[in-house]
Amino acid sequence: MTAAEQSATVDAIVIGAGFAGIYATLRLTAMGLTVRSFDAADDIGGVWTWNRYPGARTDSLHETYCFTFDRDFYNEWAYTDIHPDQSEVLRYLHHVAERFDLRKLYTLSTRVESATFNEATDRWDVRTDSGEQVSAPYLVTGLGLVSAPIIPDVPGLESFGGELYMTANWPHDEVSLAGKRVAVIGTGSSGVQVISTIVGSVADLTVFQRTANWVARTGNRPVSDEERQGIRQHPEQVWDRVRQHPAGWPWEPVKRMALDTPAEERERLFEEAWEEGGFALLYKTYADLSTDKAANDILCDFFARKIASLVDDPVLAKKLTPNHPYGAKRPPAAEGYYEAFNRSDVHLVNLTETPIVSFTDKGIRTSAGEHEFDVIILATGFDAITGAFTRIDIRGLAGERLNDHWAEAPRTYLGLMITGFPNLFMVAGPQSPFANLPPGAQGQADWIANAIAHMRSDGIVRMQPSMDAEIEWTAHLDEIAEGLMTRYGEAAGSWFTGANVPGKPRAYNVYFGGHNVHADRCDAEQAADYPNFKMSQPVSADV
Protein backbone atom coordinates (compact mmCIF):
# COMPACT_ATOMS: atom_id res chain seq x y z
CA MET A 1 0.00 0.00 0.00
CA THR A 2 1.42 3.40 -1.02
CA ALA A 3 1.53 6.45 1.26
CA ALA A 4 -1.32 7.99 -0.74
CA GLU A 5 -3.40 4.86 -0.33
CA GLN A 6 -2.67 4.79 3.39
CA SER A 7 -3.94 8.33 3.91
CA ALA A 8 -7.26 9.47 2.41
CA THR A 9 -9.58 12.45 2.75
CA VAL A 10 -13.37 12.19 2.42
CA ASP A 11 -16.47 14.08 3.57
CA ALA A 12 -17.69 11.48 6.04
CA ILE A 13 -16.52 8.29 7.72
CA VAL A 14 -19.05 5.67 8.82
CA ILE A 15 -18.23 2.80 11.18
CA GLY A 16 -20.58 -0.17 10.96
CA ALA A 17 -22.31 -2.30 8.32
CA GLY A 18 -25.53 -3.23 10.11
CA PHE A 19 -28.87 -1.42 9.85
CA ALA A 20 -27.46 1.76 11.40
CA GLY A 21 -24.25 1.95 9.39
CA ILE A 22 -25.78 0.93 6.08
CA TYR A 23 -28.53 3.52 6.26
CA ALA A 24 -26.14 6.27 7.36
CA THR A 25 -23.90 5.40 4.41
CA LEU A 26 -26.85 5.40 2.03
CA ARG A 27 -28.23 8.69 3.33
CA LEU A 28 -24.94 10.59 3.32
CA THR A 29 -24.06 9.34 -0.15
CA ALA A 30 -27.45 10.46 -1.43
CA MET A 31 -26.56 13.98 -0.20
CA GLY A 32 -23.56 13.98 -2.51
CA LEU A 33 -20.94 13.42 0.20
CA THR A 34 -17.90 11.24 -0.38
CA VAL A 35 -18.07 8.45 2.20
CA ARG A 36 -15.74 5.75 3.47
CA SER A 37 -17.36 3.04 5.57
CA PHE A 38 -15.66 0.35 7.65
CA ASP A 39 -16.63 -2.85 9.37
CA ALA A 40 -14.66 -5.56 11.16
CA ALA A 41 -16.74 -8.34 9.61
CA ASP A 42 -15.93 -9.85 6.24
CA ASP A 43 -19.31 -8.89 4.80
CA ILE A 44 -22.22 -6.47 5.09
CA GLY A 45 -24.72 -7.32 7.84
CA GLY A 46 -23.58 -6.10 11.24
CA VAL A 47 -24.75 -8.29 14.12
CA TRP A 48 -26.42 -10.64 11.64
CA THR A 49 -23.04 -11.42 10.09
CA TRP A 50 -21.59 -12.57 13.40
CA ASN A 51 -24.61 -14.19 15.09
CA ARG A 52 -25.14 -17.23 12.87
CA TYR A 53 -25.81 -19.62 15.74
CA PRO A 54 -28.61 -22.23 15.56
CA GLY A 55 -31.98 -20.58 16.15
CA ALA A 56 -30.85 -16.97 15.61
CA ARG A 57 -33.98 -14.99 14.85
CA THR A 58 -35.31 -11.50 15.45
CA ASP A 59 -38.24 -11.02 17.80
CA SER A 60 -39.26 -7.87 15.96
CA LEU A 61 -42.04 -8.21 13.41
CA HIS A 62 -41.28 -8.68 9.72
CA GLU A 63 -43.09 -5.58 8.43
CA THR A 64 -41.02 -3.32 10.70
CA TYR A 65 -37.59 -5.00 10.56
CA CYS A 66 -36.61 -3.11 7.45
CA PHE A 67 -36.25 0.38 6.00
CA THR A 68 -39.26 2.47 5.07
CA PHE A 69 -37.74 5.46 3.26
CA ASP A 70 -39.13 4.41 -0.11
CA ARG A 71 -42.50 2.75 -0.69
CA ASP A 72 -41.46 0.93 -3.87
CA PHE A 73 -38.32 -0.41 -2.25
CA TYR A 74 -40.29 -1.39 0.87
CA ASN A 75 -42.62 -3.48 -1.30
CA GLU A 76 -39.75 -5.17 -3.14
CA TRP A 77 -38.87 -7.34 -0.15
CA ALA A 78 -40.89 -10.05 1.57
CA TYR A 79 -39.77 -12.00 4.64
CA THR A 80 -40.96 -15.58 4.96
CA ASP A 81 -41.78 -15.56 8.69
CA ILE A 82 -43.30 -12.98 10.99
CA HIS A 83 -40.03 -13.16 12.99
CA PRO A 84 -37.32 -13.45 10.31
CA ASP A 85 -34.36 -15.70 10.98
CA GLN A 86 -30.72 -14.71 10.71
CA SER A 87 -30.25 -15.87 7.14
CA GLU A 88 -33.23 -13.84 5.88
CA VAL A 89 -32.22 -10.66 7.71
CA LEU A 90 -28.71 -11.02 6.32
CA ARG A 91 -30.10 -11.49 2.80
CA TYR A 92 -32.20 -8.36 3.26
CA LEU A 93 -29.19 -6.26 4.28
CA HIS A 94 -27.23 -7.62 1.32
CA HIS A 95 -30.19 -6.69 -0.89
CA VAL A 96 -30.07 -3.11 0.43
CA ALA A 97 -26.32 -2.86 -0.15
CA GLU A 98 -26.59 -4.18 -3.68
CA ARG A 99 -29.71 -2.24 -4.63
CA PHE A 100 -28.07 1.06 -3.66
CA ASP A 101 -24.52 0.14 -4.71
CA LEU A 102 -23.07 0.54 -1.21
CA ARG A 103 -20.51 -2.27 -1.23
CA LYS A 104 -17.96 -0.17 -3.10
CA LEU A 105 -17.96 2.29 -0.17
CA TYR A 106 -17.10 -0.35 2.44
CA THR A 107 -13.72 -1.54 3.58
CA LEU A 108 -14.46 -4.85 5.33
CA SER A 109 -12.44 -7.10 7.62
CA THR A 110 -11.05 -3.86 9.03
CA ARG A 111 -11.28 -2.53 12.58
CA VAL A 112 -11.15 1.16 13.41
CA GLU A 113 -8.58 1.40 16.18
CA SER A 114 -8.59 5.13 16.87
CA ALA A 115 -10.42 8.33 16.01
CA THR A 116 -9.02 11.73 17.01
CA PHE A 117 -10.58 15.14 16.46
CA ASN A 118 -7.93 17.39 14.92
CA GLU A 119 -8.59 20.90 16.23
CA ALA A 120 -6.29 22.48 13.65
CA THR A 121 -8.26 21.07 10.73
CA ASP A 122 -11.71 20.47 12.33
CA ARG A 123 -11.59 16.92 11.03
CA TRP A 124 -11.64 13.44 12.48
CA ASP A 125 -8.45 11.49 11.86
CA VAL A 126 -9.22 7.77 11.85
CA ARG A 127 -6.71 4.93 11.90
CA THR A 128 -7.53 1.29 11.12
CA ASP A 129 -5.81 -1.94 12.09
CA SER A 130 -4.38 -2.14 8.56
CA GLY A 131 -2.47 1.10 9.14
CA GLU A 132 -4.70 3.15 6.86
CA GLN A 133 -5.47 6.72 7.92
CA VAL A 134 -8.62 8.50 6.77
CA SER A 135 -9.67 12.07 7.53
CA ALA A 136 -13.18 13.57 7.39
CA PRO A 137 -15.07 16.47 8.99
CA TYR A 138 -17.90 14.11 10.01
CA LEU A 139 -17.64 10.79 11.84
CA VAL A 140 -20.79 8.67 12.08
CA THR A 141 -21.00 5.50 14.15
CA GLY A 142 -23.39 2.59 13.72
CA LEU A 143 -21.61 0.28 16.12
CA GLY A 144 -24.62 -1.69 17.32
CA LEU A 145 -26.09 -2.24 20.78
CA VAL A 146 -24.69 -5.75 21.23
CA SER A 147 -21.48 -5.97 19.24
CA ALA A 148 -18.80 -6.27 21.94
CA PRO A 149 -19.00 -9.87 23.20
CA ILE A 150 -17.83 -10.93 26.65
CA ILE A 151 -15.49 -13.87 27.12
CA PRO A 152 -15.83 -15.34 30.63
CA ASP A 153 -13.00 -14.36 32.95
CA VAL A 154 -12.52 -17.92 34.17
CA PRO A 155 -9.17 -19.73 34.09
CA GLY A 156 -8.43 -22.59 31.74
CA LEU A 157 -10.60 -21.72 28.77
CA GLU A 158 -7.70 -22.21 26.37
CA SER A 159 -7.07 -25.69 27.78
CA PHE A 160 -10.40 -27.15 26.71
CA GLY A 161 -9.69 -29.92 24.22
CA GLY A 162 -13.10 -30.03 22.54
CA GLU A 163 -14.95 -27.65 20.24
CA LEU A 164 -15.49 -24.12 21.57
CA TYR A 165 -17.95 -21.66 20.00
CA MET A 166 -19.38 -18.22 20.80
CA THR A 167 -22.89 -17.35 19.71
CA ALA A 168 -21.64 -13.80 19.03
CA ASN A 169 -18.98 -15.04 16.61
CA TRP A 170 -20.38 -18.25 15.14
CA PRO A 171 -18.41 -19.93 12.32
CA HIS A 172 -19.55 -19.39 8.75
CA ASP A 173 -19.00 -23.07 8.01
CA GLU A 174 -21.61 -25.57 9.16
CA VAL A 175 -21.17 -26.82 12.71
CA SER A 176 -22.37 -30.35 13.48
CA LEU A 177 -23.57 -30.84 17.05
CA ALA A 178 -25.48 -34.05 16.44
CA GLY A 179 -24.72 -36.82 18.87
CA LYS A 180 -22.36 -34.70 20.99
CA ARG A 181 -22.28 -33.73 24.66
CA VAL A 182 -22.91 -29.99 24.61
CA ALA A 183 -22.73 -27.25 27.25
CA VAL A 184 -24.42 -23.88 26.78
CA ILE A 185 -23.31 -21.12 29.16
CA GLY A 186 -25.84 -18.31 29.34
CA THR A 187 -29.62 -17.95 29.19
CA GLY A 188 -30.00 -14.57 27.52
CA SER A 189 -31.59 -14.15 24.10
CA SER A 190 -28.97 -16.09 22.14
CA GLY A 191 -28.63 -18.79 24.81
CA VAL A 192 -32.33 -19.63 24.96
CA GLN A 193 -32.57 -19.65 21.16
CA VAL A 194 -29.66 -22.07 20.86
CA ILE A 195 -30.95 -24.33 23.63
CA SER A 196 -34.44 -24.54 22.12
CA THR A 197 -33.05 -25.29 18.67
CA ILE A 198 -30.41 -27.95 19.36
CA VAL A 199 -32.31 -29.93 22.00
CA GLY A 200 -33.13 -33.38 20.69
CA SER A 201 -30.33 -33.42 18.13
CA VAL A 202 -27.43 -33.49 20.60
CA ALA A 203 -26.64 -36.51 22.73
CA ASP A 204 -26.70 -34.55 25.98
CA LEU A 205 -27.25 -30.88 26.79
CA THR A 206 -26.23 -29.06 29.97
CA VAL A 207 -27.38 -25.47 30.53
CA PHE A 208 -25.31 -23.26 32.82
CA GLN A 209 -27.65 -20.57 34.16
CA ARG A 210 -26.47 -17.49 36.05
CA THR A 211 -29.81 -15.68 36.10
CA ALA A 212 -33.16 -17.27 35.30
CA ASN A 213 -35.01 -15.48 32.50
CA TRP A 214 -38.64 -14.88 31.63
CA VAL A 215 -38.76 -16.59 28.20
CA ALA A 216 -41.93 -15.95 26.22
CA ARG A 217 -43.04 -18.02 23.26
CA THR A 218 -42.02 -16.64 19.88
CA GLY A 219 -45.37 -17.25 18.26
CA ASN A 220 -43.46 -17.48 15.01
CA ARG A 221 -45.28 -18.59 11.86
CA PRO A 222 -45.15 -17.95 8.12
CA VAL A 223 -46.43 -14.63 6.80
CA SER A 224 -49.66 -15.24 4.91
CA ASP A 225 -50.23 -13.89 1.40
CA GLU A 226 -53.20 -11.90 2.71
CA GLU A 227 -51.09 -10.23 5.40
CA ARG A 228 -48.37 -9.38 2.95
CA GLN A 229 -50.80 -7.95 0.41
CA GLY A 230 -52.54 -5.84 3.04
CA ILE A 231 -49.25 -4.34 4.17
CA ARG A 232 -48.17 -3.57 0.62
CA GLN A 233 -51.43 -1.81 -0.13
CA HIS A 234 -51.23 0.48 2.90
CA PRO A 235 -47.65 0.58 4.20
CA GLU A 236 -48.04 4.15 5.48
CA GLN A 237 -50.51 2.91 8.09
CA VAL A 238 -47.88 0.50 9.41
CA TRP A 239 -45.20 3.19 9.42
CA ASP A 240 -47.44 5.64 11.27
CA ARG A 241 -48.23 3.12 14.02
CA VAL A 242 -44.52 2.34 14.37
CA ARG A 243 -43.70 6.05 14.64
CA GLN A 244 -46.27 6.54 17.40
CA HIS A 245 -45.47 3.40 19.43
CA PRO A 246 -43.09 3.65 22.42
CA ALA A 247 -41.19 0.55 21.29
CA GLY A 248 -41.44 1.14 17.54
CA TRP A 249 -43.97 -1.64 17.00
CA PRO A 250 -46.88 -1.69 14.51
CA TRP A 251 -49.44 -1.80 17.34
CA GLU A 252 -51.68 0.80 18.91
CA PRO A 253 -50.30 1.79 22.34
CA VAL A 254 -52.47 0.29 25.10
CA LYS A 255 -54.03 2.51 27.78
CA ARG A 256 -55.86 0.03 30.01
CA MET A 257 -54.41 -0.73 33.44
CA ALA A 258 -53.92 -4.20 34.92
CA LEU A 259 -54.78 -3.00 38.42
CA ASP A 260 -58.11 -1.63 37.17
CA THR A 261 -59.06 -4.89 35.42
CA PRO A 262 -60.94 -7.84 37.01
CA ALA A 263 -58.77 -10.92 37.56
CA GLU A 264 -60.65 -13.12 35.07
CA GLU A 265 -60.31 -10.52 32.31
CA ARG A 266 -56.61 -10.09 33.05
CA GLU A 267 -56.07 -13.83 32.83
CA ARG A 268 -57.88 -13.99 29.49
CA LEU A 269 -55.81 -11.18 28.00
CA PHE A 270 -52.55 -12.64 29.31
CA GLU A 271 -53.46 -15.99 27.75
CA GLU A 272 -54.11 -14.35 24.38
CA ALA A 273 -50.79 -12.52 24.55
CA TRP A 274 -48.98 -15.71 25.59
CA GLU A 275 -50.30 -17.51 22.53
CA GLU A 276 -49.36 -14.60 20.27
CA GLY A 277 -45.84 -14.67 21.70
CA GLY A 278 -42.93 -12.29 21.52
CA PHE A 279 -43.40 -8.90 23.14
CA ALA A 280 -47.21 -9.16 23.17
CA LEU A 281 -47.29 -9.77 26.94
CA LEU A 282 -45.53 -6.49 27.57
CA TYR A 283 -46.88 -4.25 24.82
CA LYS A 284 -50.40 -5.54 24.00
CA THR A 285 -51.90 -6.12 27.43
CA TYR A 286 -51.61 -3.31 30.01
CA ALA A 287 -49.94 0.08 30.23
CA ASP A 288 -48.91 -0.18 33.89
CA LEU A 289 -46.81 -3.36 33.67
CA SER A 290 -43.59 -1.38 33.27
CA THR A 291 -44.47 1.39 35.71
CA ASP A 292 -46.23 -0.29 38.64
CA LYS A 293 -44.54 -3.10 40.57
CA ALA A 294 -47.90 -4.42 41.80
CA ALA A 295 -49.15 -4.74 38.21
CA ASN A 296 -45.89 -6.37 37.14
CA ASP A 297 -46.18 -8.85 40.02
CA ILE A 298 -49.52 -9.98 38.59
CA LEU A 299 -47.89 -10.64 35.21
CA CYS A 300 -44.98 -12.45 36.86
CA ASP A 301 -47.40 -14.63 38.81
CA PHE A 302 -49.10 -15.57 35.53
CA PHE A 303 -45.72 -16.30 33.95
CA ALA A 304 -44.51 -18.36 36.94
CA ARG A 305 -47.65 -20.48 36.71
CA LYS A 306 -46.93 -21.00 33.02
CA ILE A 307 -43.42 -22.22 33.81
CA ALA A 308 -44.79 -24.55 36.50
CA SER A 309 -47.26 -26.01 34.02
CA LEU A 310 -44.60 -26.56 31.35
CA VAL A 311 -41.82 -28.05 33.52
CA ASP A 312 -42.65 -31.43 35.08
CA ASP A 313 -40.22 -31.20 38.02
CA PRO A 314 -41.44 -28.56 40.53
CA VAL A 315 -37.95 -28.05 41.95
CA LEU A 316 -36.52 -27.49 38.49
CA ALA A 317 -39.41 -25.19 37.57
CA LYS A 318 -38.61 -23.07 40.60
CA LYS A 319 -34.95 -22.76 39.53
CA LEU A 320 -36.09 -21.67 36.07
CA THR A 321 -38.40 -18.99 37.49
CA PRO A 322 -36.82 -15.51 37.79
CA ASN A 323 -37.09 -13.40 40.91
CA HIS A 324 -36.90 -10.07 39.06
CA PRO A 325 -39.75 -8.14 37.41
CA TYR A 326 -40.61 -8.84 33.79
CA GLY A 327 -38.81 -6.15 31.79
CA ALA A 328 -36.08 -5.49 34.37
CA LYS A 329 -33.74 -7.03 31.81
CA ARG A 330 -34.16 -7.61 28.10
CA PRO A 331 -36.91 -10.25 27.77
CA PRO A 332 -36.09 -13.00 25.24
CA ALA A 333 -38.36 -15.38 23.35
CA ALA A 334 -37.92 -18.97 22.23
CA GLU A 335 -40.22 -21.84 21.30
CA GLY A 336 -40.19 -24.85 23.62
CA TYR A 337 -37.52 -23.53 25.98
CA TYR A 338 -39.08 -24.64 29.26
CA GLU A 339 -40.34 -27.93 27.81
CA ALA A 340 -36.75 -28.83 26.88
CA PHE A 341 -35.97 -29.37 30.57
CA ASN A 342 -38.45 -32.26 30.76
CA ARG A 343 -36.04 -34.38 28.75
CA SER A 344 -33.72 -36.79 30.53
CA ASP A 345 -30.81 -35.66 28.34
CA VAL A 346 -31.15 -31.98 29.36
CA HIS A 347 -29.65 -30.74 32.65
CA LEU A 348 -29.54 -27.41 34.47
CA VAL A 349 -26.56 -26.15 36.44
CA ASN A 350 -27.51 -23.21 38.63
CA LEU A 351 -24.39 -21.05 38.85
CA THR A 352 -25.66 -19.24 41.94
CA GLU A 353 -25.47 -22.57 43.74
CA THR A 354 -22.41 -24.14 42.06
CA PRO A 355 -20.34 -21.48 40.24
CA ILE A 356 -17.80 -22.29 37.54
CA VAL A 357 -14.33 -22.63 39.02
CA SER A 358 -12.38 -23.32 35.83
CA PHE A 359 -12.43 -24.81 32.38
CA THR A 360 -10.49 -28.04 31.96
CA ASP A 361 -9.19 -30.06 29.05
CA LYS A 362 -12.33 -32.21 29.28
CA GLY A 363 -14.98 -29.62 30.12
CA ILE A 364 -16.08 -27.37 32.98
CA ARG A 365 -15.32 -27.62 36.67
CA THR A 366 -17.84 -26.12 39.08
CA SER A 367 -17.67 -26.01 42.88
CA ALA A 368 -19.55 -29.33 42.83
CA GLY A 369 -17.24 -31.18 40.42
CA GLU A 370 -16.26 -31.61 36.77
CA HIS A 371 -18.60 -31.92 33.78
CA GLU A 372 -17.22 -33.44 30.58
CA PHE A 373 -18.26 -32.13 27.14
CA ASP A 374 -17.45 -32.46 23.47
CA VAL A 375 -18.66 -28.92 22.75
CA ILE A 376 -18.91 -25.74 24.84
CA ILE A 377 -21.04 -22.86 23.53
CA LEU A 378 -20.49 -19.45 25.12
CA ALA A 379 -23.69 -17.41 25.08
CA THR A 380 -22.18 -15.11 27.67
CA GLY A 381 -23.53 -11.78 26.51
CA PHE A 382 -22.08 -8.41 25.61
CA ASP A 383 -20.48 -5.32 27.01
CA ALA A 384 -23.59 -3.73 25.57
CA ILE A 385 -24.26 -0.21 24.32
CA THR A 386 -20.95 1.41 25.32
CA GLY A 387 -18.55 -1.52 24.86
CA ALA A 388 -18.14 -1.07 21.12
CA PHE A 389 -17.18 2.59 21.72
CA THR A 390 -14.80 2.08 24.62
CA ARG A 391 -12.86 -0.53 22.63
CA ILE A 392 -11.89 2.25 20.18
CA ASP A 393 -9.47 4.99 21.24
CA ILE A 394 -11.74 8.01 20.62
CA ARG A 395 -10.38 11.46 21.54
CA GLY A 396 -12.16 14.80 21.32
CA LEU A 397 -11.29 18.39 22.18
CA ALA A 398 -8.07 18.89 24.14
CA GLY A 399 -7.36 15.19 23.61
CA GLU A 400 -10.10 14.09 26.02
CA ARG A 401 -10.61 10.32 25.83
CA LEU A 402 -14.18 9.15 25.45
CA ASN A 403 -13.42 6.46 28.03
CA ASP A 404 -12.66 9.23 30.53
CA HIS A 405 -15.74 11.21 29.57
CA TRP A 406 -17.79 8.10 30.26
CA ALA A 407 -15.77 6.90 33.26
CA GLU A 408 -18.77 7.05 35.62
CA ALA A 409 -21.58 6.67 33.07
CA PRO A 410 -22.31 7.34 29.40
CA ARG A 411 -23.32 10.94 28.76
CA THR A 412 -24.80 12.19 25.50
CA TYR A 413 -27.50 14.49 24.23
CA LEU A 414 -30.42 12.54 22.74
CA GLY A 415 -28.06 9.60 22.23
CA LEU A 416 -26.89 11.41 19.09
CA MET A 417 -23.88 13.53 20.07
CA ILE A 418 -21.41 14.08 22.92
CA THR A 419 -20.15 17.30 24.50
CA GLY A 420 -16.49 17.84 23.68
CA PHE A 421 -16.57 15.54 20.64
CA PRO A 422 -17.63 17.79 17.76
CA ASN A 423 -19.10 16.31 14.61
CA LEU A 424 -19.19 12.80 16.11
CA PHE A 425 -22.69 11.52 15.35
CA MET A 426 -24.10 8.25 16.70
CA VAL A 427 -26.86 6.12 15.21
CA ALA A 428 -28.43 3.91 17.90
CA GLY A 429 -25.72 4.93 20.33
CA PRO A 430 -25.75 5.00 24.14
CA GLN A 431 -28.81 6.71 25.67
CA SER A 432 -30.90 6.21 22.53
CA PRO A 433 -34.25 4.39 22.85
CA PHE A 434 -34.68 0.72 23.67
CA ALA A 435 -36.96 -0.08 20.76
CA ASN A 436 -37.26 -1.89 17.45
CA LEU A 437 -33.95 -0.93 15.86
CA PRO A 438 -34.47 -0.32 12.10
CA PRO A 439 -37.13 2.44 12.44
CA GLY A 440 -35.09 4.19 15.12
CA ALA A 441 -31.85 3.88 13.16
CA GLN A 442 -33.49 5.30 10.07
CA GLY A 443 -34.95 8.26 11.96
CA GLN A 444 -31.70 9.03 13.76
CA ALA A 445 -29.60 8.78 10.59
CA ASP A 446 -32.05 11.13 8.86
CA TRP A 447 -31.61 13.59 11.74
CA ILE A 448 -27.83 13.34 11.43
CA ALA A 449 -27.94 13.87 7.67
CA ASN A 450 -30.12 16.96 8.12
CA ALA A 451 -27.76 18.32 10.78
CA ILE A 452 -24.77 17.88 8.47
CA ALA A 453 -26.67 19.57 5.64
CA HIS A 454 -27.39 22.48 8.01
CA MET A 455 -23.70 22.73 8.92
CA ARG A 456 -22.60 22.73 5.30
CA SER A 457 -25.16 25.32 4.19
CA ASP A 458 -24.30 27.70 7.06
CA GLY A 459 -20.53 27.29 6.96
CA ILE A 460 -20.40 25.58 10.37
CA VAL A 461 -17.28 23.54 11.05
CA ARG A 462 -18.06 22.27 14.55
CA MET A 463 -21.31 21.07 16.09
CA GLN A 464 -21.62 19.67 19.60
CA PRO A 465 -24.25 19.68 22.36
CA SER A 466 -23.92 22.06 25.27
CA MET A 467 -22.86 20.62 28.60
CA ASP A 468 -26.20 21.69 30.10
CA ALA A 469 -28.07 19.74 27.40
CA GLU A 470 -26.00 16.63 28.06
CA ILE A 471 -26.57 16.88 31.81
CA GLU A 472 -30.30 17.49 31.37
CA TRP A 473 -30.75 14.55 28.97
CA THR A 474 -28.88 12.17 31.25
CA ALA A 475 -30.93 13.30 34.27
CA HIS A 476 -34.14 12.87 32.28
CA LEU A 477 -33.07 9.41 31.12
CA ASP A 478 -32.27 8.37 34.71
CA GLU A 479 -35.56 9.73 36.03
CA ILE A 480 -37.55 7.80 33.43
CA ALA A 481 -35.67 4.54 34.11
CA GLU A 482 -36.10 4.90 37.87
CA GLY A 483 -39.86 4.99 37.38
CA LEU A 484 -39.90 1.69 35.48
CA MET A 485 -39.08 -1.94 36.17
CA THR A 486 -35.62 -1.17 34.80
CA ARG A 487 -34.73 0.13 38.25
CA TYR A 488 -34.37 -3.54 39.19
CA GLY A 489 -31.90 -4.10 36.35
CA GLU A 490 -28.80 -4.33 38.50
CA ALA A 491 -30.27 -7.08 40.67
CA ALA A 492 -31.31 -8.90 37.49
CA GLY A 493 -27.81 -8.70 36.02
CA SER A 494 -29.09 -6.65 33.10
CA TRP A 495 -27.00 -5.05 30.38
CA PHE A 496 -29.50 -2.19 30.57
CA THR A 497 -27.45 -1.03 33.58
CA GLY A 498 -24.10 -2.69 32.80
CA ALA A 499 -24.66 -5.14 35.66
CA ASN A 500 -23.66 -8.10 33.49
CA VAL A 501 -20.06 -6.84 33.21
CA PRO A 502 -17.87 -7.02 36.32
CA GLY A 503 -16.40 -3.62 37.14
CA LYS A 504 -18.49 -1.69 34.63
CA PRO A 505 -20.02 1.52 36.04
CA ARG A 506 -23.68 1.04 36.91
CA ALA A 507 -25.77 3.40 34.83
CA TYR A 508 -28.79 3.39 32.57
CA ASN A 509 -27.38 2.91 29.09
CA VAL A 510 -30.57 3.24 27.06
CA TYR A 511 -33.56 5.59 26.99
CA PHE A 512 -36.85 4.08 28.17
CA GLY A 513 -39.03 7.13 27.58
CA GLY A 514 -40.27 5.80 24.26
CA HIS A 515 -39.22 5.66 20.61
CA ASN A 516 -42.06 8.06 19.82
CA VAL A 517 -41.15 10.59 22.53
CA HIS A 518 -37.50 10.51 21.52
CA ALA A 519 -38.36 11.02 17.85
CA ASP A 520 -40.64 13.95 18.77
CA ARG A 521 -37.87 15.57 20.77
CA CYS A 522 -35.32 15.09 17.99
CA ASP A 523 -37.75 16.61 15.48
CA ALA A 524 -38.38 19.57 17.79
CA GLU A 525 -34.66 20.17 18.27
CA GLN A 526 -34.12 20.26 14.54
CA ALA A 527 -37.19 22.41 13.83
CA ALA A 528 -36.01 24.98 16.39
CA ASP A 529 -32.58 25.25 14.71
CA TYR A 530 -30.62 23.25 17.30
CA PRO A 531 -30.96 25.47 20.40
CA ASN A 532 -29.13 22.95 22.60
CA PHE A 533 -26.06 22.78 20.39
CA LYS A 534 -22.94 24.91 20.05
CA MET A 535 -22.11 25.80 16.46
CA SER A 536 -18.71 27.13 15.40
CA GLN A 537 -17.66 28.74 12.16
CA PRO A 538 -14.05 28.93 10.93
CA VAL A 539 -11.88 31.29 12.97
CA SER A 540 -11.46 33.54 9.97
CA ALA A 541 -15.24 33.94 9.78
CA ASP A 542 -15.63 35.00 13.41
CA VAL A 543 -16.54 38.62 13.99
Image (spheres, rainbow, N blue to C red):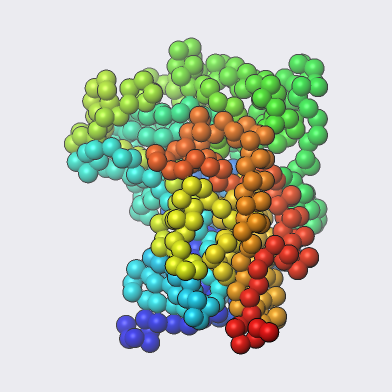
Q: Nearer the viewer, residue 251 or 110?
A: 110
- Residue 51 is situated, as x and y percent measured from the top left of the image, at 45, 50
Q: Residue furthest top?
A: 314
- Residue 12 is situated, as x and y percent measured from the top left of the image, at 54, 75
| Res 76 seen here | no
Q: Tally the numbered discs.
A: 0
Give the residue displayed 41% in from the left and 28% down from the top: 209
In the image, residue 90 sits, relative to residue 152, either above or below, namely below
512 sits to left or right of 288 = left
| Res 155 seen here | yes
In the image, residue 537 sits, relative to residue 306, either above or below, namely below
Instruction: Name the quadrant of the N terminus.
Output: bottom left
Res. 309 image quadrant: top right
Q: Residue furthest front?
A: 543
- Residue 382 is situated, as x and y percent measured from the top left of the image, at 44, 45
Q: Nearer the viewer, residue 348 or 335?
A: 348
Give the residue displayed 66% in from the left and 25% down from the top: 293
423 sits to left or right of 515 = left
Instruction: Name the quadrant of the C terminus.
Output: bottom right
